[in-house]
Structures are given as C-alpha cells and as structure tokens.
Amino acid sequence: MGNPLRTAQDRRLPRIPEPCALVIFGVTGDLSRKKLIPAVYDLANRGLLPPGFVVLGFARRDWGDGDFESLALEAAKKGARTPWREDVWQRLASQFQFVPGSFDDDAAFDHLAATLDDLRERNGIPGNAAFYFSIPPAAFPLVLNQLARTGMADNAKSGGWRRVVVEKPFGHDLESAIALNQLVDEVFTPQDVYRIDHYLGKETVQNILALRFANSLFEPVWNSKYVDSVQITMAEDVGIGSRAAFYDASGAARDVLQNHLLQLLALVGMEEPTSFDPQEVRAEKLKVLKAISLPKDISTGSVRGQYLPGWVAGERAMGYLEEKDIPADSTTETYAAVRLGIQNRRWAEVPFFVRVGKRMPRRVTEIAILFKRAPHLPFDPADVEMLGHNQLVIRVQPDEGVVLKFGSKVPGTQMEVRDIAMDFQYGEAFTESSPEAYERLVLDVLVGDRTLFPDAAEVEQSWRVIDPLEAAWAGTKPEPYRAGEWGPRAADEMLAREGRSWRRA
C-alpha cells in the first residue's frame, strides 16, 4: 500500500526507484566509464538510489567482481560531479557484480539470467532490471535476441519490470530504424523501451519548456508574426577522437543532426501540450517533426563540409583525412548546415537554420530566436547602425543560460541606439549545480518516467528528414573549411542569399 500522505504533487520528497538492478552491456567502454558509472555514484551520493540497488557489468573481459570494482572506482572518482564520500562508495561498490562473456556466448547470458534470479533472495530485488546498451549499434540485435532467448526481457517471467535503454544512433536510415524498432518492441513491450538522447537530459534543454509555457512574456511573440528566423548551432572544437570507424560510416548529419538537433527544433517549435504527461509531450514534438520541410533545392539549401588542417585554440589541428584510420579519399562530412521549414500556421515562412560541425573555433550549443526588426524606426539611420535583430539565445552548453539582446540608448547627448545583452547564467542564479544529463536520464529509466525519451515514431520521422539529404549528397564532395573556422564559406553564402547571416556563437 502506498503512503496515503504522499501525493504526486508533493515535490519535497525525492523520486527514489523501487529496488532494482542496472545491467550495463559494454561496461568497460568510454560511455560507461565517463558517464554512466559517475552518474550512478552521484545518484547514490544524493540519496536517490534504493537499498539493495545492484550494478551488473557485462563485457568481454576475464574479470571478477573485484576487477570491475577497481575500474568503477577509478571512473567514479574521475567523473563524479558531487563530492567524494568514501562511505557512499563502499555501500555502492558492495553491490557491484561482473559477468564476463561475449554477445554470442549463450552460457554467459544464461549466467547473467541466473545472477538476476539470485538477486531476489540475496538483495530483495523483485525482478526489476534495466538493461543499458552501451555497445556499438551493430550489436543491438544480437543482445536483444539473447535477452529474448533467456526470457530476461519478459516482465511476467521476471516478476517485476524489465526495461531497455538504447543509445543513439537508432539505425542508420529509415529502413534500419524501422527494423530495429520492430525487433526491440517484440523483445520488450514498447512502453519499456527507452531510446536515450542525452541532450534531452540537460537542464537547459528542459528549460525551453519552462521558458515558453511558464511565462506570458515569450509565447505571444513565439510565431511567424514576430520571429524572423531560428538558428540552432552545435559546434565542437574537437575532432573525431577514437571514433574513426563509426564516424566515417555515419557523418555529422546521421551522428548529430538526426537526433540532437531535430529534437531541439521540435522543442522550440512544438505547441503547448495539454499536460507534461510523456505521451502528450511526445505527441506535440511528433507534429513538428512531421511538419518539417526540406529546401526545394537541397544543393543550395544545404551545405556539407570537411575540415582541413588548421589551428584551434592556438594549437595545430590535423585535417579529417589525416586522422587515424580515415581513408584518404573519404567524402564523409564533418560539418552540415541546412535550411528547414515547419509547415504550420505558427511557423509559416520562418526558416530554421540548423548547423553542426567539428573542429570549430570553440565548443558551443545554442538556440537563437531572431526577431523581426521594428516596422518603423524614427531614428536617423546613422544612429541605429549598431542595432541588430532582437535575439533570445538559449545556451545549452557550456555556459548554460539565456541571453536576451535588445536595443538601448547609448549614454550621451545623441540618440544613438545599439544592442545590449541581459545574461542569465545557471551557475550564478541557482545555488544547486545542474545534474549531468545521464544522471537525470538514468534515474528516469529506473523510476519509469519516459517524458525525455523519444519514441519509435519520433525516431522514424527524424530519419524521413535526413534520408533525402543523404540521397541528395550521395556522390558529392564536401566543401573544405580549415580547422578553427566556423565552417565552409558556402554556409555563409547560403544565408547571405536571403540577406541573413549566422549569429557569431
């Protein structure tokens, strides 16, 4: 029986999951070490994990529980956001277990199933388990079939809930995404599938909804009558690192545009949901994704680029073709920019310029709403030369916050007007630091909150936007740009043809 004194509206008590296990496939990989294990420690440190919570690691290593604990200790100390507390770690580490094996090893999966069954008696976990796929996408079907064979994905057989967390990219085109959706929904029930997009776990991304729907200030002007254009930028100053095999087969559009940036576009463009029920939020996002229109001429309404050797932050940076394991004749794009539209009454004729790139001058992800100029300016033209568009800029990372740019008189005897900025920063406005995205999303999986997780329809609709771009780009060479530049010159020309320019992020 639930607590009769506690209601869903009471925010004083934290959300704590039922006793459960988190099974991490590929636990020795970068994602697990840099994000998942630190997130689990931070949740434990904040008192948000239940007694008896167990982490089961699965990987192709000849390890015991002690080896896994050592790896986890190093990862948690290096990546934890909250202060280190040895007592918290000792309680958590005592619940770490490791199961060695490969994904085609039936005996290893039988051992994993038996281990989960043993937790009922030893840890009081009533069959609840979440399976996290921190593995290459090509291995998803193999692991899913093993979970189906052993019955580990069956809620009824387990006596509790069984959930699966699948990392992006979810497929590499529409056809593969549909096939993967069908498989994962057959093995797990659809409501137990969590397709993770870590950008949706960022506080600043969730703040888009608060900014729009909790204030009467912005929503009246959030439409084509007042908005000139929208720019969504995700720039990285790094190269491809150790992801050569994956990146060269996918490119910037499949890697980031299909998921992160289209999700940001959906949150900016969606209508107000009737409630923040997960189904209601996803329904409104899906309407936006279905309303996206591509340029009539993709060759002039989009640009793909590839970085050359250059300088980033005062250091020499190699070109993409010089990166380790990249073919010398690769035509994979490291930069993509496209002009999109949203075909509905709110956004008719408003262009959405979306761009992503590697080896840019600095790391920044932001959404800029550029408003139309005042219909009449009763000033001398020389007095408003420094006046640009009013802008509302949502900084997703790294300097999380919101900037409002508008015109103001310059002190003095002349009526000179120029842009000024009001800057809100999360780190200064709130005493509590923002949790990491994975911290929020792992907790959401364990408590069964699907609000921040795209469903199958959203994933498939996103591919319907990307596939025509990829088809139009096939056989073409990307435009060159030097490392440390804001992309190819053709991207600037794409906006200049409309009398617009990229906001300098």
Image: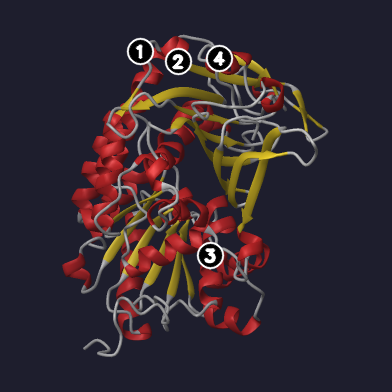
Asked whether the beta carbons under mark 4 and mark 3 sit within 8 Å of each other, the answer is: no
Residue 416: give x, y in percent of width and height: 72, 32
Residue 443 lies left or right of residue 251; in this view the side is left
> Of the residues tagged 1 and 3, which is closer to the observer?
1
**Residue placed most toward the observer, 287 or 499:** 499
Q: Which mark is residue 39?
A: 3
Distance, label 4 to label 3, CA atoms, is 38 Å
The residue pinned by badge 1 equals 296
Asked whether the beta carbons under mark 2 and mark 1 sit within 8 Å of each other, the answer is: yes
Colour setup of the view: secondary structure
Q: In terms of sequence position, does the residue under pointer 1 or pointer 4 come before the other?
A: 1
Q: In terms of sequence position, does the residue under pointer 2 or pointer 1 come before the other?
A: 1
Q: Secondary structure at mark 1?
A: loop
> Of the residues tagged 2 and 4, which is closer to the observer?
2
The residue pinned by badge 4 equals 478
Residue 430: give x, y in percent of width and height: 60, 67
Q: Secondary structure at mark 4?
A: loop
Distance, label 1 to label 3, CA atoms, is 44 Å
